[in-house]
Each structure stands twice: as C-alpha cells, then as structure tokens.
Amino acid sequence: MPDRRSFLRSSMLAAASAAFPFAATISKSDKPEIRMKIIGDPVLLSTWNHGIPANEKAWQVLNETGSIVDAVEQGVRVIENDPDNLSVGLQGLPDRDGIVTLDASIMKGDGSCGSVAFVRQVKHPISLARLVMDETPHVMIAGEGARKLAAENGFELQEEELSPRAEEAYEKWLEQSEYKPVINIENHDTIGMIGIDGNGKMAGSCTTSGLAYKMHGRVGDSPIIGAGLYVDDEVGAATATGLGESIIRICGSFLIVELMRQGRTPQEACEEAVRRLISKHDNVDDIQAGFLALNKDGEAGAYAVQPGFNYALHNRAGNELVDSGSMRS
C-alpha cells in the first residue's frame, strides 16, 4: 500500500496534468532548439553616383567573405583607384601648392576604428586606415608618420605627380589663384559607405582627397571619427560628405547616431543634423553637406543642405541611385 507521501505526490502530478496537459509529457529533449536570430537582409549605402560601383564590389566581397568590414574597405578602394575621379584617391584635385593629400577612416560597430590624415603617395589610404585599426594601439596617424607606416608595411608609394585631368584643372585654377573653397553640389566628392550584414554587424568607411585647392595641411571631416563617420552596432551608422569644416563643427555622424539612439528614424536624424549645421552658419549659400544614415533594422535615411546630393543603395532587390531631399530648394 502506498504511503501518504507517495499518494500526495501522485495526486499533485495528476492535478498538474489535468490543468496543463503538456506538463506531464514534455521532456528536455522535446524543448525547441534556440537558434541565433537573423536580424535581416544586408544593406549597403554609399554617397554619390560613384557609390554604385563601390556597392557592387562591396556586395560581392560580403557574399564571398561574410565580412562587412572587408566589404566596406574593398568597396571604396574601387573609387580610390578610379583614374577619372577627381575627389578621391591620388588622381584627385590637389591643394593650393599642387600636392595631393588624402584622408580616410574605417570603423566597426564594436567601436574599433582607424584613420589616416594628410597622407601623401599612398594609393589606398582606406587600407592604411584599417591597418591603424587592426595593427596599432592608435586611432589616427597623420602626415609623414602615416606615409612611414605605409612604407614599413609593404604599401607601394606612388610617384608624386598630378593626373592629367587634375593637372589641367589646377593650371586653370592658378590663373586666378582665388583662395575660396570650391563646394561641389553635384556628383563628385568624398565617398562614404556604411553597411549592415545579415547578422546585424555594421561597419563604415570614408575616403577622400579633400577640398580642392585647400591650404597645405588642411584636414577635413572624413578621417575624424564622429564627424565624417560613426558606427555603433547597438544603434546604427552614419557618414557625411561635403564641406568638412561645417560637418566637424557639429560632429555630424555621431550626432545622427545619437539621435537614432534617442528614437529618431534615420531620415529624421539626417534632417535634424542638417538643421543643426545650418544653424551654425550665417550664410550657407556656398555650403553643401549631405548625410547618410542606416539603423540596426536596415532602415536608411539621407538629407542635404543643397539639392544635388544622391546616394547608392544596395540590398537584395538590387543596386540603385537615389536622390536625397534637401533643406534648400
């Protein structure tokens, strides 16, 4: 005959089975397997129409390697190597002394970042920026130190001469030698790229030959983390293009990411950044700046001070050029 304790235990199990029929039959092996959630489809955004070929390369690299960092690096290298581009790479327009100097930055969503500024003779400054991120304890290396770092790590230093198109443009500029920033409000400027992979990992890159006919030694927003580029896996990413001084003054890319952290959509954050930028200047007639943003859900936004800014968007549906809205018409 069962004792009182056994009888009570049997009665309690029977009651549980009646109230929750699955409770009596579920076992450890029956529990559903918990798998890592896939956040969504990959998305790439790049500034200007040269973002189309950059995105194509980045998408290919992402599919081959699965690395969003490799993708944003290799994507913008295509533009650094484009002999017809006058605003990125060694073929870009020089400073007022006739010397081409380059700036670049790269950043991962975990906060890792690297940049180079005022660097000469290096064909792919974005890869040198990645070397700074991956192989040094620093974030930014500039000038002769950046060139020395490149040489010591196997980067081929190019002959310091202007490309034919850049030389022609420089000779024409010398006729007046007017020291006034030439603001590009059409499709030629910095390339900034931001992206997210299928697992929610984000990265970004930014590279430029800088403002045409700038003072020798001038550095713009592109290599400054938080100005030309900022990435945070928890929130999203942003990049900028245009007059670097105006973007630096508001820490434009960091501002956009922080606005998204507070609940703004990428579009709302870009628009607020443009309003903030305009509020810091008495006259923006000669200022162009454009922003791109991407949140952790793969939603994009873009906005500019002046019309004419566009960007390339690549997802599984394809690679397209999109016209951005602007504050001024």
Image (cartoon, rainbow, N blue to C red):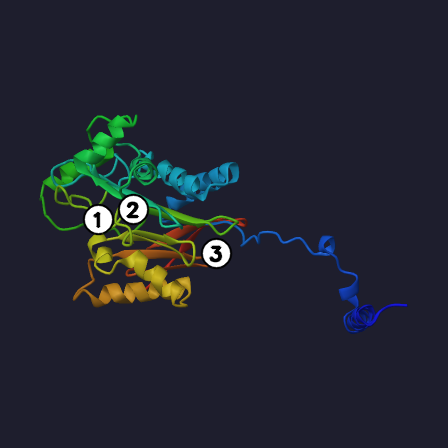
In the depicted structure, whether residue 233 falls above or below residue 67 = below
Q: Quadrant of residue 55?
A: top left
Between circles 1 and 2, the one closer to the viewer is 1
**Marks 1 and 2, the one that precedes in the sequence:** 2
The Cα atoms of the two marked residues, 1 and 2, are separated by 10 Å
Q: Which part of the image, by quadrant, shows the C terminus?
A: bottom left
The Cα atoms of the two marked residues, 2 and 3, are separated by 23 Å
Q: Which residue is mark 3?
A: 298
Tag 2 secondary structure: loop
Category of crowding for the residue at label 1, using alpha-carbon neighbours closer than 10 angstroms: few (below 14), some (14–19), many (at least 20):
many
**x, y percentage for residue 100?**
19, 36
Q: Is residue 293 visible?
A: yes
Q: Nearer the viewer, residue 164 or 24?
A: 24
Category of crowding for the residue at label 3, using alpha-carbon neighbours closer than 10 angstroms: few (below 14), some (14–19), many (at least 20):
many
Residue at (11%, 40%) from the top-left corner?
174
Circle number at residue 220:
1
Q: Which residue is mark 2?
A: 190
Q: Residue furthest right?
A: 1
**Marks 2 and 3, the one that precedes in the sequence:** 2
